[in-house]
Amino acid sequence: MTAAERVMAVFTGEKPDRPPFALTLSLYGARLINAPLASYYADPALYAQGQVRVAELVSPDIIFAPFALALEAEAYGAELRYHPDGPPMVRRHPFRAPRDAASLSPPAIDTCPGLAYLCESVRRLADHFCGSVPLAGVLTAPVDLPAMLMGLDGWLETLLFEPALAETVLAAATEHFAAMAGALAAAGAACIAIPLMLANPTLVTPEVISRSIVPPLAQAFARTPIPIILHHGGNPAMPFLPLVKDLPNVAGFVIGPGDSFAAARSIVGEEKLILGNLNGPVLNRLTPEQAGARAAAILADRRDDPHFVLASSSADVPLDTPLETLLAVRAAVEGHGGGR
Amino acid sequence: MTGEGTTLQKLVAEVLRRINDADRDGASRLVDQWAAVHGYGDAIAEILEPVLRTVGDRWEREAISLAQGFVAGKVAEDILNKALAAAPKGVFGEVKGPVVIGNIEDDYHSLGRGMVGTFLRAAGWAVIDMGNDVSPAEFVDRAVETGARVIGVSAMMFVTARGIRGVRDELDRRGLSGRIMLAVGGAVFKVRPELVAEVGGDGTAGSAMDAPVLFKSLWERSLDAGGEQ
């Protein structure tokens, strides 16, 4: 089976030759081709080269587009900071006060180097893999983009105390999301992974989520031409799954390293994909044996789940993770061939 | 239980309910109404403090959301501002501090730091908030200049948290460790508690609501260590 066939099998509930696995190795590609991160996150050819190397060496069943959400904020004037061992982050928000965002309007993708880079990276990967490996685009949720534009405190203040302004900002963020999702799909993405932050009751009350978060998400997701995978965004997934499980076009959920697959399955039902829960950012601290054992334990737990993908949870796998550790995860998956 | 005690308990419960509902104006209004009769000093001691204690307890038990903690901070800020504007100087007793807070170099996640500042002020501390992206030397310069015995440094991500080590090094280099205490905090310290020691922190707090207790203990440790600045 190709990776695409394997992923499609768990999507439809067919039996694959072995469980598919996906590690968030968007950052890691830079290490494999020894590329400076500032270039890697600006040059689509370099990014594609890094991911091709990821495929050659690790062979995950899903390849990720750049996990560089700050590039979306840059399109609105955010100043970015490039770290030596991580993706770019927002250094200065483009809006000093929430009211400044009242006239927010989505920029044209082609005129913004960061947005064009995200799309072109996917296009180059699609050209290379020709459908053999599914490509996951990565986008900021429309309800989270404003936090990158005015700071989390500014966005919370808007969301909680200025509902009319929040609605205006969300309408613009929804347009941005729909345009980007369409562009990534046109470039060849098979799905879009979205870390979801403010839909989580650990951050915002369920009432605010139901009133102000879920409706714009429903509008945005309904306009997405490809399936969506919702990611726990670093917070526990259990509190937010009941609130977002029925959003349109959502095909699956990445749960956190501390979450329970069984609990997640009982919430989202039998048909949706569930992905996770290797703790991606700490893989660098595990020996290959520990990583392999952890993967094997998850696979054993999910043996009877036809809609499961072993994946890394949380953020990108760190740059200093030994390749052997990643290969141990792959070996654990390959050891489960035909095990279902 | 006196009649006034029962009324106060009900009032505290109602303020908490409104904070839970993100009803900032409604919560502030209730405190204002009490203050109109009893004064803001009384309102802060009898209503705001127990409210914030309960919010802190709930936070510790992960029984409230970040947004509810944020609303509590905003209500506290509203009440303090009105109290300060209404009262003659010194009416709230001796001001503690000053203490210096800020986000370390390259860190721009100001939400937690802002809440720490609010809860410190609510507890009577004079707070010098240096904002985001503050270098170790700037932190120490400001503490020396103002006589602060505690510096509180915040970082959200691992990559920026490591920069806090520079504040410890700067304190060591100038012979100020022990006299100026280093409080560290931010989301990453909850996930990786061992980081407190790695960056040379003298202490941390589980939430912004716990910051006043931490700063008080660090201030006392500084005094115990003796030495003038």
Image (cartoon, rainbow, N blue to C red):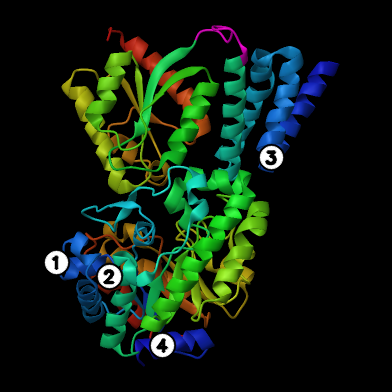
Look at discs 1 and 2 and give the one toward the viewer: 1
Give the farthest residue toward the front. A103
Per the image, the residue denoted by label 4 is: A6
Residue B78: x and y in percent read: 60, 28
Disc 1 and disc 3 in contact, CB within 8 angstroms: no
Q: Is B174 situated left or right of B56 in this image?
A: left
Quadrant for the C terminus of chain B in the image: top left
Marks 1 and 4 sit apart, C-alpha to C-alpha, by 30 Å
Q: CA distance from mark 3 to mark 4?
A: 50 Å
Frontmost residue, B170 versus A158: A158
Three-letter residue code for mark 1? Asn
**Residue at 38% of width from left, 88% of height from top?**
A4
Contact? badges 2 and 3 (CB < 8 Å)? no
Give the x, y percent position of residue A55: 26, 80
**Is there a contact, CB below 8 Å, between mark 1 and mark 4?**
no
Q: Is residue A339 visible?
A: no
Residue of label 3 = B23
User: At 51% from the left edge and 28% from the top edge, which residue is drawn?
Assistant: B118
Identify the magenta region: B86-94
- Dot 4 amino acid type: Arg
Badge 1 and badge 4 both on one subunit: yes
Tag 3 near tag 4, CB within 8 Å: no
Circle 2 chain:
A
Q: The numbered mark 3 sits on a residue in which chain?
A: B
- Upstream in sequence: badge 1 or badge 2: 1
Disc 1: which residue: A34
Tell me the number on the disc at residue A326.
2
**Disc 1 residue crowd, few under 14, some 14–19, many 20+, Cα 10 Å:** few
Q: Is residue A310 magenta?
A: no
Q: Nearer the viewer, residue B197 or A98?
A: A98
- Quarter of the image with the N terminus of chain B in it: top right
